[in-house]
Image: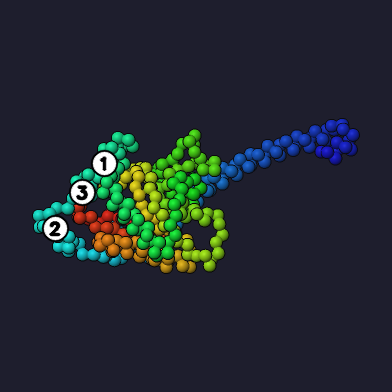
Amino acid sequence: VGMLMRESKGEETEEIVGIKAEATTVGETAAGVEESLAEIESKMNSLLASLPNLLDDVVPDGDDDSQNELVSEWGDVSSLPKELGWDEDFTPLWHDDVATNLGGWQSDAAVGMSGARFVSLTGDVARLERAISSYFLDRAGQKGYTEVSPPLVVSRTALEGTSQLPKFEDDLFKIMPESHTCNGEDAFLIPTAEVPLTNMHAGAILEESELPISYCALTPCFRAEAGSYGRDTRGLIRTHQFYKVEMVKITTAETSADEHEKLTRHAQECLEELKIPYKKMRLCSGDVGFSAQHCYDLEAWLPSTGEYREISSC
């Protein structure tokens, strides 16, 4: 158009008018194409994000936790009464009853200030929680894990990187954008320290010689527990806030399976040193986590209910 305008000495000829109209039409078409492309890319990314990880060949087929595979079992449940000096008529109490008898279970106060599924521990019970947490952290340090004190608020991108989003958004505590955003993104309280520990190296290229990197952290974890209404309403089984020691390893694909077994063994040793009977279960395809390729649950024995319950997921 500029060249034609110079040739016509500034006169807007019929040819120039036609070219301008064509350019306007092309621009509008391009804008429409870009808008359609953005919509297609958004749908594609949403579909790709909904695809779970490919499972390891060792993962058994199954629909739910009833079809998980028992890998090993440690401890003799039947010998516990003798080892602990229980009388024949002794009935083990729930942990919240034990804590209440010790004067350290303040659930009413917690519910009064925070709502259902919150608990406050005091005195010796609070010190016990701290002592066990410190023991786990110290033991992880002895096994080569670097202790981290990470942020408790993370971005949407960080949660997408560990596959908590988009599938599990209803289980997260979201912070109002008027209060805080993470670099312009939605902000959430962490559901597990796995999220910030894994994102310590997000976007970075690591030298193979630096691997494996082993991290551990003690943090409060926040979970909305959507869909769990009426389930596990007693004690510390399913609360909105709880403390957890997390162990994470960052390694190569070739050594991933070996490092997974080492990490799982480190968790098992903690239970064994505390003399807590447990089962090591391999999760079936219908129970394994969305982002996991292969997962073990360590199920600890609960004398009060006479059952094994998941205490660690590796």
User: The residue tagged with tag 1: helix, strand or loop?
Assistant: loop
In this figure, what is the number of numbered marks?
3
Foreground residue among 254 and 278: 278
Q: Which percent across, then down, holds residue 245?
A: 37, 54
**Labels 2 & 1 near each other (Cβ < 8 A):** no
Assign the N terminus to one quadrant of the image.
top right
| Comes first in the chain, label 1 or label 3 | 3
The residue where tag 3 is placed is 98
Q: Which percent across, then down, holds residue 230?
A: 27, 42
- On screen, residue 73 versus residue 219, left or right, reads left
| Comes first in the chain, label 2 or label 1 | 2
| Comes first in the chain, label 3 or label 2 | 2
For image coordinates 75% across by 37% down, the residue present is 22
User: The residue tagged with tag 2: helix, strand or loop?
Assistant: loop
- On screen, residue 157 versus residue 34, left or right, reads left
Q: Which percent across, then down, holds residue 291?
A: 43, 55
Q: Alpha carbon of mark 1 to alpha carbon of mark 3: how far?
A: 12 Å
Q: Which percent across, then down, holds residue 31?
A: 65, 39
**Can residue 19 be seen at all in this image of the molecule?**
yes
Colour convention: rainbow
Question: Looking at the picture, which amino acid does disc 1 mark?
Answer: Gln
Question: Looking at the picture, which amino acid does disc 2 mark?
Answer: Trp
The image's mark for residue 86 is: 2
Q: Quadrant of residue 298?
A: bottom left
Question: Looking at the picture, which amino acid does disc 3 mark?
Answer: Val
The image's mark for residue 106 is: 1
User: The residue tagged with tag 3: helix, strand or loop?
Assistant: helix
